[in-house]
Image: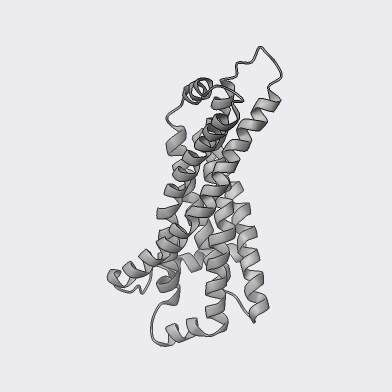
């Protein structure tokens, strides 16, 4: 409860004594590049392979001739849109983006750069952290859309290369019993997960005490706490919205 209270006070500090909006704009653009552009490669590679693996595993599990093979495409779509694209991508980004945020702020803390900002009258929490959180909220949904698209494409490419099933059956499965709400549901999850990863990682990094060893511990703690909260939020949102 003490940590939760400190986290809430930290969030409140972001919105008091703020700098002019124009000061945040360039920092916001830089953070969008860090969170979004620099994550495209790793998200793309993992999504392509996971999409292909789902198809292979589904085909291996289908040993009942009464089950139509189109179920492979259906299962691929449901697993990717509902779970893999938003949740697994968020956990991957918690390791990459979250750890980077925690180590950056932790290094600034132990090298007294944050104290220097405070001495100059700048709200360091708002100046350093608010652009990161907004960038996370803005960039996570496009990364989730990219991940879902490439996962489906990964299954498509695998089928072309291996001929394990026909493309017609795969596409018919993708179209089967489609619930349009699954797309906004995935984007809502991406929005929430983006906030969790950036705010929790910033909280851990900003409150680092000690030296280089503690910076590494803050990065690890940021990843662990973000991952747990992502899974908890995933369960909560599924119960509330589905």
Do we see residue 2 in this rendering? no
User: Eyeballing the image, is 33 above or below 53?
Assistant: below
Q: Which color scheme is applied?
A: one colour
- Which of 21 and 152 lies nearest the eye of the viewer? 152
Q: Position of residue 204 (x, y in %)?
A: 58, 68
Q: Position of residue 95 (x, y in %)?
A: 59, 59
User: Eyeballing the image, is 92 above or below 17?
Assistant: above
**Residue at (55, 55) in percent of width and height:** 93
User: Eyeballing the image, is 195 above or below 53?
Assistant: below
Question: What is the total number of numbered labels drawn onto the structure image?
Answer: 0
- Which of 13 and 84 lies nearest the eye of the viewer? 84
**Residue at (48, 24) in percent of width and height:** 171
Q: Quadrant of residue 98?
A: bottom right
User: Eyeballing the image, is 71 above or below 135?
Assistant: above
Q: Position of residue 92 (x, y in %)?
A: 58, 53
Q: Is residue 30 left or right of residue 160?
A: left
In this view, which residue lies farthest toward the top?
66
**Residue at (50, 54) in percent of width and height:** 41
- Which of 39 and 186 lies nearest the eye of the viewer? 39
**Residue at (61, 47) in percent of width and height:** 231
Q: Position of residue 64 (x, y in %)?
A: 70, 16
Quadrant containing the N terminus is bottom right
Q: Is residue 21 left or right of residue 15?
A: left
Do we see residue 11 in this rendering? yes
């Amino acid at each position: 409860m003490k940590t939760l209270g400190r986290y809430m006070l930290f969030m409140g500090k972001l919105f008091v004594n703020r700098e002019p909006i124009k000061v945040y704009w360039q920092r916001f653009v830089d953070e969008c590049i860090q969170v979004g552009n620099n994550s495209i490669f790793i998200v793309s590679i993992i999504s392509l392979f996971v999409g292909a693996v789902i198809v292979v595993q589904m085909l291996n599990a289908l040993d009942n001739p009464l089950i139509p093979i189109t179920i492979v495409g259906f299962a691929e779509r449901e697993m990717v849109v509902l779970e893999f694209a938003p949740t697994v991508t968020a956990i991957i980004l918690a390791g990459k983006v979250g750890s980077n945020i925690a180590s950056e702020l932790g290094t600034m803390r132990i090298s007294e750069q944050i104290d220097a900002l405070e001495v100059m009258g700048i709200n360091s929490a708002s100046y350093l952290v608010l652009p990161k959180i907004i960038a996370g909220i803005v960039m996570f949904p496009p990364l989730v859309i990219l991940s879902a698209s490439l996962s489906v494409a990964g299954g498509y490419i695998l089928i072309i290369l291996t001929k394990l099933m026909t493309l017609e059956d795969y596409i018919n499965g993708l179209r089967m019993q489609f619930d349009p709400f699954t797309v906004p549901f995935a984007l809502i999850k991406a929005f929430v997960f983006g906030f969790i990863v950036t705010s929790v990682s910033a909280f851990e990094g900003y409150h680092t005490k000690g030296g280089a060893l503690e910076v590494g511990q803050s990065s690890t703690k940021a990843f662990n706490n973000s991952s747990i909260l992502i899974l908890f939020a995933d369960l909560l949102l599924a119960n509330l919205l589905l």
